[in-house]
Image: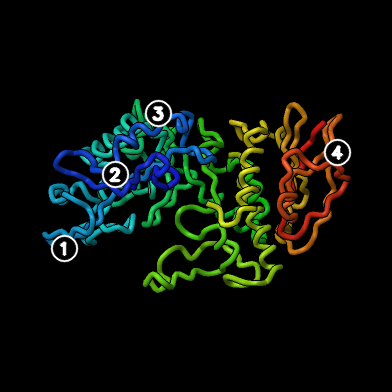
Amino acid sequence: MVEEIGGDTASRAGATILGAAIDSGSGGVLIAIGNPREIREAPKQSEFATAEIVRSSADTLKIGVEIATQTETKWFGSKTQEIGVENVAQINGRRDFWTVVEQVPKVESDLTGNTLNCNHPVVMGLILDSLRHWVVEYHVDGFRFDLASVLCRGTDGAPLNAPPLVKSIAKDAILSRCKIIAEPWDCGGLYLVGSFPNWDRWAEWNGKFRDDMRRFIKGDCGMKGSFATRVAGSADLYKANKRTPYHSVNFVIAHDGFTLYDLVSYNLKHNDANGEGGNDGNNDNFSWNCGCEGETDNNSIKALRSRQIKNFHLALVVSQLEARRSNHFRFFKEAIKFRRTRRVFSRDTFLGKNDVTWHEDNWDNHESKFLAFTLHDSSGEDIYLAFNAHDFFVKVSIPPPPAKRRWFRVVDTNMESPDDFVTEGVPGIGSTYNVAPYSSILLEAKI
């Protein structure tokens, strides 16, 4: 499955993407859209003139595209039951176009029925032509490939070390200039985070970043080192060949699974209304309800949930690499603006020993859930950060600022809006700071 980064429709351009279907007769892709001309012209309009996929702002052109790695059909002997894809009779007649094992009716790598053999020359040509069409005709900036490990399987479903389709996309004269992002796993268990075949071009959704962030912020033991590794750019996964921190797409929540509000409100899934009996979705959400399952009128729990949401925001924004409440929207907006205007967050290499100071001499303490560190800038505009996942206050010693500078408090997620994020900073920071339970702070060195 190939889907646009972001997953929304291009409603701002006046069109709605409804879906896509394989047309085996023409060798192309049928896209059901509200108005193709508006989609094609949208990136040329002034509001999209500088739009770029994978940008943390509202000016990104978002087009939903689903194509080619599977169709909603199932084999029933010689008869194919069509569930939603138009005109697939001819392609269904070619079993070599599908990933099929004779002893097993289908290899469920994507949970949709049949999985296309994406590395078959005909299927590969179909996919490449379709992707180029979206770039050339619709001016999209890139693609995020859902369950992309499906692209790394052979006809029998076995993993390939150098899958032809993945390599062709990376080497293609048109597609190689786009943003190419893999969701590096599939429903068949092929988990390739950090090892997706990439030719130094493919970026990856960093699922380990998501899981380690969730576990540290909610207070799991033994996660401090992993949290530090993820904040520092996941060099353990991506520091190889010519890969950079930008090859890791960091995220905490996505279009599937728990929302950010769910992440701090529920320990378990409650998918009771959809008829699936709670069997749908992932059970390993690493969530914490902060003391009450679901909605509550307890103001202490609600305040804790609010802090946790802001902690996730801050951890994501400072990592190298529609809001439920207006205060959280404001906080995240300010955090994004702050990141964009501080060079210390814009490195294109992994952190070296002169780039960061870890204020930590207790890495082996399994019970420790506090981490503080300073990101250094050549001009002296250092950033100090501390994350406290304990259920008690931690009084931390603040290191001296660079020469001729003072520390200003920019963020304290324990405070109410608008004091939780003050872009210009609040002076008067002493030699120690009391970091509240389940809270984080950011200090900036300024003249």
Secondary structure under tag 4 reads loop
Helix, strand or loop for disc 2: strand
Element on which disc 3 rests: helix
- Identify residue type, mark 2: Ile
Q: Is mark 1 on a helix, strand or loop?
A: strand
| Image x and y of residue 336, in percent | 61, 41
Seen at 66% across and 65% down, the residue is 302
| Residue named by callout 1 | 76
Q: Which of marks 3 and 1 is nearer the N terminus?
A: 3
Which residue in the structure is indicated by mark 3? Answer: 44
Inter-mark Cα distance, 3 to 2: 18 Å
First in sequence: mark 3 or mark 2? 2
- Cβ–Cβ under 8 Å for marks 3 and 2: no
Q: What residue type is labelled 1?
A: Phe
Nearest-to-viewer mark from 4 and 3: 3
Q: Which mark is residue 400?
A: 4
The foreground one among 220 and 365 is: 220
Q: Distance between the residues labelled 4 and 3?
A: 50 Å
Q: Distance between the residues labelled 4 and 1?
A: 71 Å
Q: Pick whichever of labels 4 and 3 is earlier in the sequence.
A: 3
Q: In this view, does 427 lie to the left or right of 155?
A: right
Residue position for label 2? 33
Provide residue 422's location: percent of width, then percent of height. 74, 44
Percent of width and height locating residue 128: 29, 35
